[in-house]
Amino acid sequence: MPDSAALAARYRDVRARTEALAEPLAPEDCVVQTMPDISPTKWHLAHVTWFFETFLLRPHLAGYEPLDPRYAFLFNSYYVQAGPRHARDQRGYLSRPTVSEVYAYRAWVDSHMQRLLESDVSPELLAPLLTIGLNHEQQHQELLVTDIKHVFSVNPLRPAYHELPPSPDEAVPAIAWIEIGEGLYEIGHEGDQFCFDNELPRHRHFLERYALADRLVTNAEFQAFMGDGGYEKPELWLSMGWATREQHGWTSPFYWEHRDGKWMTYTLGGMREVDPAEPVCHVSYFEADAYARWSGSRLPTEEEWEVAARSEPIQGTFADAARYHPAPYRRAAGAGFQQIWGDVWEWTRSQYSPYPGYAAAPGALGEYNGKFMANQFVLRGGSCATPQDHIRASYRNFFPPEACWQFTGIRLARDT
């Protein structure tokens, strides 16, 4: 169990990283909400602060007084047991508190968190709550990046968040298939390090023999699907996927535009031509599933993905590289599976459901994961917006099948 000094250092590091992500933004950038799934940067900065105030300061720091009691209503997200909350799709209505007032709120909570960590409250009591709060803030660091990308993308000026570094020019070899034998495997988190409750309990799962692609599907490969009429062939699509494609008029991945005879895409470095060697990104589950069917393959289950990934070191294109865009294929020395960590979240065919024996934690924190176990699919591996020390083989991300504004991509699987 870490001591108070170590907890305080980790707290300062994560909080500083959030503010560093917001630093390139003007106040006007921080207040825009472009769709219900997107939250303004200002709201992210305040909500993660509300989390520490609600779950650590209010219950555990004697005499704590909030900077503004009304923030409890404004910056709660979905924790029903924590009290009433402002409507999610109206977060962009909040011109007040101002961005500067939100930073003052962060400073207020940070100073009181320092007092709490220096108090005589047991580190054994605080550490689990603080660790959840810091991992929660890391999740919102990723959301801050994905959300500001959407905000900038709908602006006709197509502003850049940062300068996108040049990509290496390397040929992408054909997919190689790596077979994994049948057997009874242990699935879920192992050990005493932190994990979310949806990664537990560890349990046995039998897998038939299968093969997993050694790399991600590229833009060039997805363009072949498009060129073959993949978006016009209902036989490739799930019924709900076809209806969604028709409703939204999908003809390409999210953020792609056809201009002057070539495909362009919006990135956080601005508009640029689609790089054929990059992993295809911002595709929904429905698109990933249709592509897999077109290619004569399928998407992996989350258990197949986990068994394959846990043998590979956690290295790849993460937020730490400050690229915020998937990198073109470049073979990592000694690795069997390429790009299995970072770059894009990989869709699996697994419905987001509880593991055998799962039980949500009591109280409001029990609402963190368990109540979303319906109508969602599991994604694995992290993305170019995920902090590297946040991810692990058992980590289960989840989104509805129509979602495509996240950094989501495709790795194929086959029965053998």
Image (cartoon, rainbow, N blue to C red):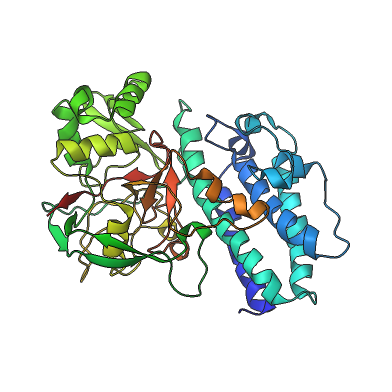
Q: Residue at x 89, y 62 (%)?
A: 63
Quarter occupied by residue 396: bottom left
Closer to us: 219 or 217: 217
Closer to us: 197 or 412: 197
Q: Is residue 407 visible?
A: yes
Judged left or right of residue 110, residue 40 is left
Residue 6, percent across and down? Answer: 63, 76
Quarter occupied by residue 282: top left
Judged left or right of residue 237, residue 285 is right
Residue 237, percent across and down? Answer: 25, 29
- Asked if residue 290 is positioned above or below residue 190 in the image, the reply reads above
Q: Residue at x 50, y 75 (%)?
A: 192
Closer to us: 251 or 246: 246
- Asked if residue 206 is positioned above or below residue 276 in the image, the reply reads below
- Asked if residue 291 is positioned above or below residue 234 in the image, the reply reads below
Instruction: Assign the N terminus to one quadrant of the image.
Output: bottom right
